[in-house]
């Protein structure tokens, strides 16, 4: 007998080098255990193409995103650092400025993620194809490289180190997906996760499911408890006669005539 149960829906998330989606993937697994999340590693140029081709439902990439057919929400900024050999003079500094790099050859790879025309310092005769190629050149003593800190960590080598550079552009990581009048439910779920929404405030298919579980009938009002000790209306505490305005017990029956 053939099982007619439909296969579970899959959410495909592309991500570029240096971006670490593990914490969001973990939360996804806790909230939507029935929907597998598949990670798709992509280069900065491949990530937007994967969204346009339908090979990924959303992508963690770096801004800017070219074209008006993709939506994006910024998530955080990355610290910019300069990668140098461990025996370089800059290795002794805590942080550097563009002026410090003015006399240094600074490499500018074609897949550079910082939004500038060219980095500070002296330009190289040729631009390396990738950041990984530029790292190799830094290790060979050819020049220095300014990158987001996450990429410096990704391409870590024992013979290299990095220092923070102030006054230069910073890379911005964003979540992007194909533009539509309304984001798909699973994309909306992931947006809620990266924005830190709680389970109760998350919109999308989970929120709709939670609404359906609620009892549509309003709960009955509780009846007021009966008076203790058989207390009657108009009686005082414990069944004693109620007091009048003067503080004396109110008299029952007809008033007495004055003699």
Image: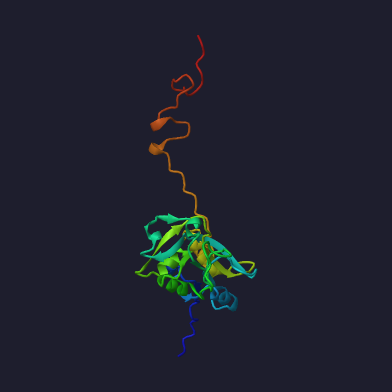
> Which is more toward the observer, 11 or 102?
102
User: How many marks do you count on the picture?
Assistant: 0
* Left or right of 241 in this view: 49: right
Using the rendered image of the protein, determine whether residue 30 is visible from the camera's viewpoint. no
Where does residue 87 sit, x and y in percent of width and height? 36, 64
Where does residue 192 sit, x and y in percent of width and height? 51, 62
Residue located 41% across and 73% down the image: 140
Q: Quadrant of the N terminus?
A: bottom left
Residue located 51% across and 11% down the image: 258
Q: Residue furthest bottom?
A: 1
Up-down: is 167 above or below 179?
above
* Residue 72 in which image quadrant: bottom right
Residue located 50% across and 56% down the image: 99
* Left or right of 73 in this view: 91: left
* Residue 115 in which image quadrant: bottom right
> Which is more toward the observer, 216 or 94?
94
């Amino acid at each position: 007998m053939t099982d007619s149960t439909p296969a579970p829906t899959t959410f495909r998330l592309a991500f570029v080098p240096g971006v670490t989606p593990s914490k969001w993937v973990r939360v996804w697994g806790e909230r939507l255990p029935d929907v597998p999340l598949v990670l798709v590693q992509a280069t900065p140029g491949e990530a937007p193409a994967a969204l346009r081709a339908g090979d990924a439902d959303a992508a963690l990439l770096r801004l800017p995103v070219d074209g008006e057919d993709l939506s994006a929400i910024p998530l955080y900024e990355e610290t910019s650092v300069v990668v140098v050999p461990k025996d370089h003079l800059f290795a002794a500094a805590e942080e550097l400025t563009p002026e410090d790099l003015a006399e240094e050859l600074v490499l500018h790879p074609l897949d550079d993620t910082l939004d500038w025309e060219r980095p500070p310092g002296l330009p190289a005769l040729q631009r390396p194809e990738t950041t990984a190629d530029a790292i190799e050149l830094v290790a060979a003593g050819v020049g220095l490289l300014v990158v987001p800190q996450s990429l410096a960590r990704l391409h870590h080598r024992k013979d290299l180190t990095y220092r923070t550079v102030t006054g230069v552009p910073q890379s911005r990581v964003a979540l992007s997906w194909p533009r539509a009048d309304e984001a798909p439910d699973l994309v909306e779920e992931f947006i809620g996760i990266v924005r830190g929404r709680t389970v109760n405030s998350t919109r999308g298919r989970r929120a709709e499911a939670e609404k359906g579980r609620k009892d549509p009938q309003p709960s009955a009002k509780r009846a007021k408890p009966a008076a203790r000790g058989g207390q009657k209306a108009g009686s005082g505490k414990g069944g004693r006669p109620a007091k009048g305005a003067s503080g004396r017990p109110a008299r029952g029956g007809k008033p007495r005539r004055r003699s």
